[in-house]
Amino acid sequence: MIEATNLTKRYGKKIAVDGISFTVQPGKVTGFLGPNGAGKSTTMRMIVGLDRPTHGHVTVNGRPYAQHRSPLTEVGALLEAKAVHTGRSASNHLRALAATHGIGQKRVDEVIEMTGLQTVARKRVGGFSLGMGQRLGIAVALLGDPRTLILDEPVNGLDPEGVLWVRTLVRYLASEGRTVFISSHLMSEMALTADNVIVIGRGRIIADASVTDIVARSAGTTVVVRSPQATQLVELMRSPAVTVTSSEPGLVEITGSTAQAIGEAAAAAQIVLHELTPVKGSLEDAYMSLTADSIEYHSTSAAEHPFAATGTVPQEQAR
Amino acid sequence: MSTLTTASATPTTGTSASPYHVTFPNVLRSEWIKFWTLRSTIWTIGTAILMMAGFGFLTVFFTAQAIKQNIGADRGGPPAGILHDPSVILVGSIMAQLAVAVLGVLVITGEYSTGMFRSTLTAVPKRLPALWAKALVLTVVTALTAVVAIALSWLVTLPTMRANDAALDLGDAQTQRILFGGVLYLVGIALLAFAIGALLRHSAAALATVLGLLLVVENVFAAIPATFFRTVSPFLPSTAGQRITSTQASIDQAREAAKAAGRTAAVLDPWQGYGVMMLWVVVLLAVAAVLLRRRDA
């Protein structure tokens, strides 16, 4: 269980995290979503005491992280993939961290096996790929068999097999009653992995609810309607809450109403319908509409700059 | 390829009764493992030993040659009686101290520059135990390195010293103090470098500061003939610390020379000098500790 109260972090004049309060429940996977620079990593660093909050406080399993006698068995954290000395081997890295808690070689070997690092464990970390670095970070997080896991972008750099493995792993750990808090900017991944989602933008919480609630609430359902009398139907449905788009004659997409309301309106006016399909919004759509105002680094439209979509979004701030 | 086999402990709410705890001996063991699992640390230790013994041998050997050929100080040769000053086997510490300083800096900045320190602090969130454990490991390793280096220097110079009737009298109190002082001096340099590394957190900045201090600043201060620099110079960390390896005779000589020239600059006694060096170390470490507690990692 993680409880944050009015958590605030200010770097000079810039507010990274702006008075957020939230609770991460045990037994569930809680996703932490937000665009780059929204404050996800800063929040996670404050949870494990690396950054000192400017205001507010955060506790893990009832206490500030630093006050636990055995921090690694309370919280396993993957904060940055390579918080590792590049000159040391993976196995020695784990051995050194395990030693701080008196955790033995047996557990070190266990986590190496769990994360599939056996073949590279004796190699120096400097030569690791991003994916191997992530696996090592996850191995560190699992070292103390912790009750709470905090994973910052764990699937970054993993291959599809690795992504599936992380998803299965965190679902399994949550099913054992552990608290799992996992950040990502990949909505599709969170839709598959998380039970609850906390959406953050510009340091503030935009939404904190279950995945299904968020999808239902914010995306607004779109209904695809095919009718020879589409124009007449659109006239009937016209209202400030409804938007209508049309890509071909006789086919309209109506957002802001429901299939039921449209069907009834059509029947009352004796309009023939060939198709009436509610299209369920995805978490991705929900997220885009939620965070549209709070994206720190906008990409210029791809039409203006062909490389803009991938080229201008800066990396999440390093620290 | 990846299997799910977590250990049996099933989490419950409330505070867990974990058998694992962060204790200082555990943190010390962790730092000990970290120290010996990097190549850079082992290289610097080897370099320090090689420098001490190598320069000791070269100096003593060629000094003896010069004496044999009757080349005195007036003709560019070694000053008379230099082989009878026990600190002659420590001449290599001028070079060895650089290796030890690099070691002291890298022990801490190596973790900052790679991000490793965040892993360390996540495991030891009270932070200070990690700093003290590092300092303790560094102290022990540097002391052992210095003992080996000085013993080796003594060994390789022994035949030449004997031939010149200058073999060290290991039973002599001053000789013991000088040899032991050679160890203490290198430990002091290592801790000074460590503290500066902990303050500056960047390898390049800390190395430049420490080496600049040892190689440039202290020499420049000693060389400028102005009252301010003359007054401050004896209290700079390396200058003060080196007193611990000086013979009483050379200190007395320096005092008389200063008096004859009408200068008021202090000439510190061996232990006074080392005390001043340790004061630098303690103050810098204390500032580093306060900042470590306060700063974001």
Image (cartoon, coloured by chain):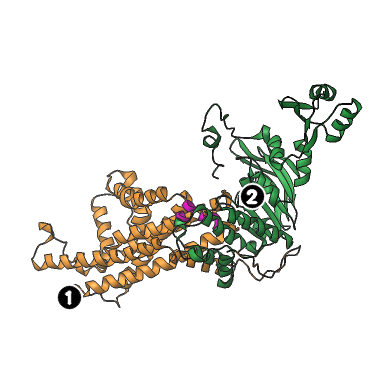
Q: Which chain is orange?
A: B
Q: Which residue is mark 1?
A: B165
Taking depth in this image into account, of A14 and B266 the one nearest to the observer is A14
**Which residue is at a point 74% across and 39% down the rendered structure image?**
A281
Q: Residue B155 appears at what percent x and percent y?
A: 26, 74
Q: Residue B103 appears at what percent x and percent y?
A: 39, 59
> What amino acid type should be assigned to the residue bearing mark 2?
Met
Chain letter behind tag 2: A
Mark 2, Cα crowd under 10 Å, few <14 / some 14-19 / many 20+, is: many
Taking depth in this image into account, of A102 and B165 the one nearest to the observer is A102
Residue span colored magenta: B108-119
Which image quadrant: the N terminus of chain A? Answer: bottom right
Query: Is A284 contained in the magenta span?
Result: no
Q: Which residue is mark 2?
A: A44
- Residue A36 shows in the view: yes
Apparent colour of chain A: green
Characterize the magenta stretch by its predominant secondary structure.
helix
Image mark count: 2
